[in-house]
Amino acid sequence: MNLDSNIPSGPLEKKWESRRFDLKLVNPANKRKYNIIVVGTGLAGGSAAATLGELGYNVKAFCHNDSPRRAHSIAAQGGINAAKNYQGDGDSVFRLFYDTIKGGDFRAREANVYRLAEVSTNIIDQCVAQGVPFAREYGGYLANRSFGGAQVSRTFYARGQTGQQLLLGCYQALSRQVASGQVKMYPRTEMLDIVVVDGHARGIITRNLVTGKIERHAADAVVLATGGYGNVFYLSTNAKNCNVTAAFRAYKRGAAFANPCYTQIHPTCIPVSGDYQSKLTLMSESLRNDGRIWVPKKQGDTRAPGDIPESERDYYLERKYPSFGNLAPRDVASRAAKEACDDGRGVGPGGLGVYLDFADSIARLGEDAIRQRYGNLFHMYAKITGEDPYKSPMRIYPAVHYTMGGLWVDYHLMTNVPGLYAIGEANFSDHGANRLGASALMQGLADGYFVLPYTISDYLASQKPGSVDDQHAAFDACETDVRERVAKLLDINGKRTVDSFHRELGKIIWDECGMARNKAGLKQALQKIPALREEFWENVCVPGGTGETFNQSLEKAGRVADFMEFGEMMCRDALVREESCGGHLREEHQTADGEAKRDDENFCHATAWEFQGVDKAPKEHREPLEFENVELAVRSYK
Amino acid sequence: MRVTLHVWRQNGPDDKGQIVRYPLDDVSEHMSFLEMLDVLNETLIESGDEPVAFDHDCREGICGACSLMINGVAHGPQAGTTACQLHMRSFKDGDEIYIEPWRAKAFPVIKDLVVDRSAFDRIISAGGYVSVNTGSAQDANLVPIGKDDADEAFDYATCIGCGACVASCKNASAMLFVGAKFSHLEKLPQGQVEADRRATAMVEQMDIEGFGNCTNQYECQAVCPKEIKVDAIARLNRAFSRSTVKNG
Amino acid sequence: MAVSGLALGGFVIGHLSGNLLLFLGRDAFNSYAEWLHGNQGLLWGARLGLLAMIALHVRTALVLRKRNTDARPVRYAFESTVQASQASRSMLLTGLLVLAYVILHLAHFTWGWLDSTAGATETLTRAGEEVVRHDTYGMVVAGFQNVFYSAIYIAAMVVLALHLSHGFHSLFQSLGLRHPSYTPKIEMGARVLAWGIAGAYMSIPFAVLSGGVS
């Protein structure tokens, strides 16, 4: 398998510029001869589809929601980073690059991350031009706030709904292309397989979720922008319909899947309240700007938070990480919360929670100032828990939030399958082993607006447009596979619901491959998952008769079936990475005071898995990571 | 607690459909409304029936997918709340709860409680954007925008496109949705350039889709989960009249 | 709706100011009526204008109603209203009732079909000459002495008040005139104006029935 990262030579700050000059172009008159498929229309896919349409390519865009406006990018709350240095507090492209590399625990490619920091400034310009209502100061200039893992204020935000505003900007740009006819939009359509002809991606097979019709779509290139796989845990902050299917289908057709064990557990989510729990809700990290995290010093302290005096509270993040305090990065903050709860000092039902307390900030700034900054988050917290966070501290607990792993891509965001691209959360490229807050939106939009539209022309220029149509034998074969799989799911007629399998899978993964992992647990998971998968294929119940109708159980079943295979790969990846880094903590590899211990000698690489067959272990490949501009240091936030 | 659900079941777009009664025991007050429906669906599947189809995704009140008419009120009894953020503590033991899909000609039913809201996408495509290509933007701080204007634009921009305004309007009018997008963009200098054109185009598309007309009853404002004000409609009315007079 | 409604609302107020001359006595009231009928151009201009506005208002209302009912072909099994006022929800009904009443009112006082006193005259001396003119005052007083008719009139004014209370502030919204601090005042003002107008109209039959005007 060829894993050439295709990184340009030359000094870091010139790499992207020189590569842009070297890229082959498609002339404007020829662009309309090329068809590009974009699967997923969140921030990455939506921005890519809109921009490709503006450039003059023929774009077909697909999403499983009823409208591109509902992609889960919409739920991102806190903000988007950009190295604008509007605050004059010492920010720069290099500092954003450095913070991101360090935040990712030195497990990302330097060149990709530098490019991300470089284009970050263009994103803000573009979004403001689209009418995104970012927060502003009274003078009319853009406001910033600080976020975890950074000591400068570089996060642009729109109250607690930044993702929504950015996505709507991108959706509107996409809608404009839909109106102009450059983009044909296929909502409520799910990609079920990818068609590879002579080693090149040439199309997809989809299912119309309303009519159940299986359809073929041919193109000169396919872009996957299908998000992350956090829902393998069943309970996560992802939307209910987020899934790994598109990326996993690509993997099964030859694309390498990199670093699946890198998952981000977000420290500030609302704790689980019961067995019926269907998903977890995030409380933006920005809350940590003004909220102080603490637990009682005493184990099993059941007093109401207001009755616990200052001297008996442990503000553990401030104590352990005095220079970053409550703004320690996510992986660090999550682990510290788990540690406190494991120590029997957790609060709320089951002891799985810590306090996020705003009393000091309210006393200092007044309730109005806090309402202005976080009103919608406080409102949401009150609705879900029935408690008033202005009066008593929030209870929070870590939850799965983002997945850094994804399809392996080169510097051009192309997978090892020529013509197949992966952008946004679906790829593995920029966040290493841990993503910093407010960087997901940045990466999605960077990929879609400012990277992919350039790099894709390099590939297209070498291809004859329309070389394969949807009558090619490969489409026949692929469509048959899809039909058989749908029929098989419907024919099982077992006793257990899809959700019950998904819950059980999620529990295995959370217990053995969650915030802390160890060899024994992972090995156990590798036994349990195939057994569960076997039961799934014998005993799942997918009602609805034929697949030729709107059938939400069938949609779910297909996705869970893929999670069943994917989860195994994830545990395998966690097992072979015998070190701790970022979101991946192996209990065998930690320092005396419980911090993650990297092994740069043996694991300074990305692991990319190659599919070998459903019940066979995938083949491991390694892409070494070379650091020429930063020194691999022990990540310290003390 | 125990509740009795009366749920609209409709097999497909051409099916006639009917209300079906489902008693449900052991409902926890901490469940969200949709988790309560999940529980119902699990029981239905286990007893060999088809689960109730309903749209949902983020379950944190921002994607706008959920769309339930609960006892005649869009998104249910709690103001400023989507159905997914509504919790069973808003109901009491023994309650009878009617659950119906959004009703509008422009939102045809696909199945059970799922409706087709693509009319909203077509309205946005008609003009709900700023015509700017990627890469042509100037520096973001070049044009200062007053905080009050930016905040007001945000208030309109917070629309999640759920369609509760249409569902609750006695005339199934989409004026709040259209007004919100129009007003968001009109409040910002970037959006003012094509404001009149946008007003005309979006209103025309709204009429083509078959939505009703605004008769200023403000049910939309009362049920909007993002609490968008009918000021948005007034702004749209003003722009529409202005552009009609100007263009003759 | 807003523009034609505004014109009709203007008439309602103009007509009321004429009617209130009744309280100044027979002479003032009859002189006003005489003056009005002496300016046939003005009178017919106003009548035709009003007729056109009524036609426009009613036609628009019916067209909108058709489009609005078409916009929701299937109704909810469980109907509920969160905040829309009763007045706003019954505009078509109240509008049609007012229209029906206007026709009755014309039949009564203008065409004189319902009441034998409608054609009564009075004789007075003007510049030494005897002049016979229509005794509008007498007609109105006689008309309202009929308790049945007065009751219809009073009921019609309540309906009119409902119609106007929504209509008056609604027209500001339809014309896009809305402001966070003025709008609540406009809404309050609209209600005061609507019920004030209706009250003033109703004062006439009450005055007649109670014997205050005879």
Image (cartoon, rainbow, N blue to C red):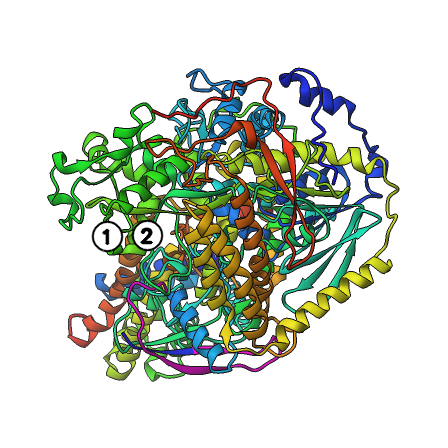
Q: Name which residue type carries label 1.
A: Gly
- Of the numbered discs 2 and 1, the one sitting upstream in the chain is 2
Q: In the rendered image of this protein, does residue A248 appear above or below residue B19? A: above
Q: Position of residue A296 (x, y in %)?
A: 18, 42
Q: Name the foreground residue: C141 vs A109.
A: A109
Image coords of residue C31 (percent x, y): 32, 61
Q: Is residue A212 magenta?
A: no
Badge 1 crowding class, 10 Å Cα cut-off, few under 14, some 14 to 19, many 20 or more, is some
Location of mark 2 (residue): A271
Examine the residues drawn in magenta and state their main secondary structure. Answer: loop
Looking at the rendering, in which quadrant would you find the C terminus of chain A?
Answer: top left
Q: Tell me the quarter of the picture where residue A624 sits.
A: top right
Q: Is residue B188 left or right of residue A171?
A: left
In the image, which residues are magenta? B7-32
Camera-side residue: A442 or A412? A412
Coordinates of residue C43 in the picture (x, y in percent):
46, 61
Chain that bears disc 1 = A
